[in-house]
Image (cartoon, grey):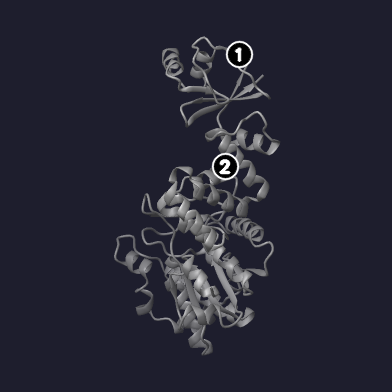
């Protein structure tokens, strides 16, 4: 299977400019660039799918230029529904540094060059830019772009600052064509108009053919919303914004309808292996093997092998059959960061502990839960309403108290 065929089979390709994807990625090794504006201090899953495509291209021998938009980030791509708030230059610079560090980890073993468009956009002179670049754009073309057209038709209006954004992104392509030899730009499908503006600028200024590729937006099929900040459902790559445990749980809980598509885009598993998982999903969906494979693979790429194993084991302690008695230091750290904790002495009555940990709203309700067999400690069902913690065996200072399958608290013995 050729690279172009694999990328299409994995679902990476939405739009291309040029004769065919085969011509763009199969016929010669190219210098390919992708740009991200630092509108936040972390990338998220919606960005990450593009980074995965870049890794496939880099693995195939293409050279990657990764642009973090310290210049365009001070302007902001027009949103379809509201004016962007201009960010303080120091905040933009801080976001640039953090996103660059994230990308450096993801691309640690690949030939990739990082650039910041503030280096050239910050040196532009207005009159020269309008004469040399602005004359190659028409207002007629710009107002046809989706976000601009939507804003012009609304009561919000559109400032000239945002209206000029496509010129800046187009100029990035021209600059990287001239200085780095970039002939392909990759972005999300919502960036198609801006990317094509760069393709056209290079054609008009240099009489050269360059190309555009966009990746489809990743949609949560259960909600119909895209992955991203604007929808309020961003899954961040930064461990401080989305903990590794939360990150793992997100992928573990994807729907059966979406998991195979996510395995193709967000992991490097061979397509044959993914098809095997698809068959197992059809035959035994309750095992959730496809989701478990996805969650571990993506967490390992983003957070590393040690953390991936730790959060997988913690997930199985909290929601599976793994015992808490043989817990590692990494797993203990993940537990403390993500599970509700309660310090308790041996000898306490279990009914009181259920109420204090809010797993029951009253002693009467706690008795009902125990009598119905809904309460377990370290996986052992407790049927005695007079049970005390001294009667429960533990291999360390932690106990897992659960009511039902999902309501839980970690008890830390003083």
Where is residue 266? Give x, y as percent.
53, 58
Is the residue marked by circle 2 packed among few (<14), some (14-19), or many (20+) residues within 10 Å? Answer: many
- Residue position marked by numbered label 1 in the rendering: 391
Residue 222 visible? The answer is yes
**Which residue is situated farthest in the bottom direction here?**
207
Q: Which callout, 1 or 2, points to the residue nearer the camera? A: 1
- Residue position marked by numbered label 2 in the rendering: 245
Q: Is residue 380 above or below residue 166?
A: above
Residue 164 visible? The answer is no
State left or right for residue 322 relative to residue 150.
right
Tell me what residue is drawn at x 60 percent, y 79 percent.
30
Where is residue 196? Give x, y as percent.
45, 77
Q: Nearer the viewer, residue 326 or 39?
A: 326
Tell me what residue is drawn at x 61 percent, y 34 percent.
335
- Tally of numbered tags: 2
Label whose residue precedes the other's in the sequence (1 or 2):
2
Q: Is residue 112 above or below residue 322?
A: below
In which quadrant is the C terminus drawn? top right
């Amino acid at each position: 299977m050729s690279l172009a065929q694999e990328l299409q089979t994995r679902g990476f390709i939405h739009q291309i400019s040029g004769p065919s994807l085969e011509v763009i990625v199969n016929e010669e090794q190219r210098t390919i660039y992708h740009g991200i504006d630092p509108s936040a201090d972390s990338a998220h899953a919606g960005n990450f799918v593009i980074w995965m495509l870049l890794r496939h291209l880099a693995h195939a021998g293409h050279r990657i230029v990764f642009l973090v938009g310290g210049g365009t980030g001070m302007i902001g791509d027009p949103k379809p529904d509201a004016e962007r708030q201009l960010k303080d230059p120091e905040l933009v610079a801080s976001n640039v540094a953090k996103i660059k560090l994230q990308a450096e980890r993801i691309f640690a073993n690949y030939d990739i060059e990082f650039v910041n468009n503030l280096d050239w956009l910050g040196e532009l002179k207005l009159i020269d830019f309008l004469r040399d670049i602005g004359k190659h754009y028409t207002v007629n073309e710009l107002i046809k772009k989706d976000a601009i057209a939507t804003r012009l038709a609304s009561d919000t209006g559109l400032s000239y600052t945002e209206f000029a954004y496509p010129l800046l992104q187009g100029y990035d392509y021209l600059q990287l064509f001239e200085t780095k030899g970039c002939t392909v730009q990759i972005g999300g499908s919502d960036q198609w108009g801006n990317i094509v503006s760069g393709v056209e600028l290079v054609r008009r200024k240099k009489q050269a053919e360059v190309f555009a590729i966009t990746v489809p937006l990743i949609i949560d099929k259960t909600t119909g919303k895209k992955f991203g900040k604007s929808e309020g459902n961003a899954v961040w790559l930064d461990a401080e914004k989305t903990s590794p445990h939360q990150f793992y749980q997100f992928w573990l809980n994807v729907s059966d309808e979406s998991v195979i598509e996510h395995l193709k885009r967000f992991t490097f598993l061979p397509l044959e292996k993914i098809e095997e998982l698809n068959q197992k999903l059809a035959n035994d969906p309750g095992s959730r093997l496809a989701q478990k494979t996805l969650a571990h693979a993506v967490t390992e790429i983003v957070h590393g092998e040690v953390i991936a194993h730790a959060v997988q084991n913690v997930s199985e302690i909290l929601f599976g059959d793994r015992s808490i008695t043989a817990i590692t230091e990494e797993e203990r750290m993940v537990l403390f960061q993500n599970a509700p904790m309660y310090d308790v002495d041996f000898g306490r009555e279990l009914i009181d502990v259920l109420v204090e940990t809010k797993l029951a709203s009253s002693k009467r309700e706690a008795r009902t839960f125990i009598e119905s067999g809904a309460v377990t400690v370290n996986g052992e069902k407790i049927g005695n309403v007079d049970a005390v913690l001294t009667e429960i065996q533990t291999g360390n200072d932690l106990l897992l108290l659960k009511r039902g399958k999902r309501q839980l608290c970690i008890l830390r013995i003083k």
